[in-house]
Image: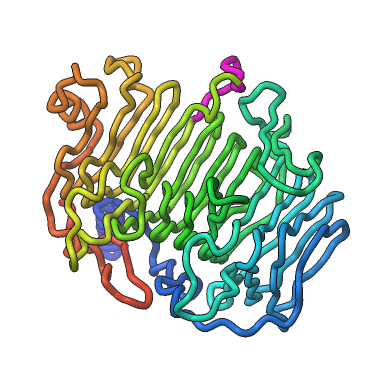
């Protein structure tokens, strides 16, 4: 009997320890190990041995015995499946606009391994790579987008019938992306436009998105346009635009996310760690369809300069921006080192009904000057912060040195952003 009681107590102790440390990204081990990279500019990659170009209209497998030069707009059509073996490196041409486009009905099976990831990167040599060397990856699915006709279009030179995403199949399957890095993307088709590292239009819940890192994109890291998506272990590193942008009726659930913003790389206005939008163009939006509804769990949104090193006061703005006519829930997360943790659009009238659509539960807001703010000049931000400080929400405001929060945040090779034991009591 005594042995049984001891085992029960040990089990309860473990549960208590877990409950104390489930803020921010979580895992028994550091899930960034092996597949991620935080110095892609200096990363050595093999020389290309094969060219990948044009229309892929039948099933194709890319071998890890080759290194591919992705030239121009490469698009997968005709319900074909592009399979990429673990460890394959695809180096996109920087001398022209290059992008990979998975069209409706086709699939991308890019399943890297923890110690053998798949890498999409620039064809430039070490030390010369930069954001906007190439366009990025587009996945066009058949899940709903809240535009008239359920469709959204990308800018492209490929035939018009292949540029469209969206449909009526919530559980649509566009493939599987695991242990993949996307580096130096974000180039637009001309000097006036830009793209994102990974753009998903109408991607359905049958698509697997896990352990994906977007680094040094000239646009957003991850952009969700409509769709019904589930994803986990997403990393955005020093992207110029927003790290995570959800719009046009995106219904998304993302667990374990990391956004590292740096004022010397990231844009200072109109871009954030997380941006929640109802639409891109209201005139094209069907307001009778489901609105953008985003659930984020176990996120870390961090200002790198707050972790030590050169300061850049005034260059880092809000971490999260929420527009009107959206639903947003964030749980068990850490936001540290920003002007404010969350900024509400001026069109959001601050009342009980609207605040019930914007839920913060167990958020550790650290080293943020204004914590939670509204653009509406008539709103008392102290009252707004007080609302989210209600004990039932379990949120915390603090000023702990950021570098003291995490297991090994300043490790130059593979940082560990899991919370140290008992750093949040």
The residue that appears at 51% across and 64% down in the rendered structure is: 184
Q: Is residue 167 visible?
A: yes
Of residue 98 and residue 230, the one placed in the foreground of this image is 98
Of residue 146 and residue 157, the one placed in the foreground of this image is 157
Q: Indicate whether 180 appears above or below 151.
A: below
Q: Indicate whether 162 appears above or below 379.
A: below
Of residue 25 and residue 201, the one placed in the foreground of this image is 201
Q: Main secondary structure of the magenta part?
A: loop
Q: How is the image coloured?
A: rainbow
The residue that appears at 30% across and 75% down in the rendered structure is: 411
- Please tell me whether residue 290 belongs to the stretch shown in magenta: yes
Residue 277, percent from left and from top: 46, 31
- Please tell me whether residue 324 belongs to the stretch shown in magenta: no
Residue 283, percent from left and from top: 58, 19
Of residue 79 and residue 210, the one placed in the foreground of this image is 79
Q: Quadrant of the N terminus?
A: bottom left
Q: Which residues are magenta?
A: 284-292
Residue 27, percent from left and from top: 39, 62
The residue that appears at 69% across and 39% down in the rendered structure is: 171
**Location of residue 155 by image quarter:** top right
* Image mark count: 0
Residue 280 in the figure: left or right of residue 202? left
**Location of residue 358 by image quarter:** top left
Residue 99 in the figure: left or right of residue 370? right
Q: Indicate whether 138 appears above or below 387.
A: below
Residue 227, percent from left and from top: 62, 36
The residue that appears at 45% across and 49% down in the rendered structure is: 255
**Location of residue 161 by image quarter:** top right
Q: Is residue 421 visible?
A: no
């Amino acid at each position: 009997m005594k042995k049984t009681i001891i085992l029960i107590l040990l089990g309860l102790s473990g549960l208590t320890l877990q409950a104390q440390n489930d803020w921010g990204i979580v895992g028994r081990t550091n899930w960034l190990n092996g597949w991620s990279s935080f110095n892609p500019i200096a990363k050595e990659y093999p020389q290309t041995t094969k060219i990948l170009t044009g229309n892929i209209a039948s099933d194709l497998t890319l071998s890890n015995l080759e290194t591919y030069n992705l030239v121009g707009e490469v698009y997968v059509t005709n319900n074909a499946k592009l399979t990429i073996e673990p460890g394959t490196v695809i180096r996109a041409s920087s001398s022209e606009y290059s992008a990979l486009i998975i069209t409706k009905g086709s699939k991308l099976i890019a399943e890297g391994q923890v110690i053998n990831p798949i890498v999409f990167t620039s064809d430039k040599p070490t030390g010369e790579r930069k954001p906007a060397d190439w366009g990025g990856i587009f996945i066009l699915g058949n899940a709903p987008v809240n535009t008239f006709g359920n469709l959204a279009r990308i800018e492209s030179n490929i035939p018009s019938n292949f540029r469209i995403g969206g449909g009526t199949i919530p559980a649509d399957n566009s493939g599987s992306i695991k242990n993949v890095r996307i580096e130096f993307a974000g180039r637009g088709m001309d000097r006036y436009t830009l793209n994102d590292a990974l753009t998903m239009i109408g991607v359905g819940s049958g698509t697997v998105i896990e352990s994906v890192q977007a680094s040094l994109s000239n646009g957003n890291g991850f952009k969700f346009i409509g769709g019904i998506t589930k994803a986990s272990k997403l990393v955005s590193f020093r992207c110029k635009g927003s790290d995570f942008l959800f719009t046009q009726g995106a219904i998304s659930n993302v667990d374990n996310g990391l956004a590292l913003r740096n004022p010397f790389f990231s844009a200072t206005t109109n871009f954030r760690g997380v941006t929640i939008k109802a639409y891109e163009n209201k005139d094209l939006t069907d307001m009778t369809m489901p609105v953008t509804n985003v659930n984020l769990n176990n996120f870390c949104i961090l200002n790198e300069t707050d972790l030590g090193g050169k300061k850049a006061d005034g260059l880092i703005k809000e971490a999260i921006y929420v527009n009107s006519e959206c639903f947003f829930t964030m749980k068990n997360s850490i936001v540290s080192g920003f002007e404010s943790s969350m900024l509400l659009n001026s069109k959001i009238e601050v009342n009980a009904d609207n605040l019930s659509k914007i839920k913060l539960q167990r958020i550790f807001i650290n080293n943020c000057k204004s914590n939670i703010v509204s653009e509406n000049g008539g709103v008392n931000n102290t009252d707004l912060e007080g609302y989210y400080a209600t004990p039932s929400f379990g949120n915390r405001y603090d000023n702990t040195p950021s570098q003291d929060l995490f297991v090994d945040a300043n490790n130059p090779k593979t940082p560990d952003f899991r919370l140290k034991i008992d750093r949040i009591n």
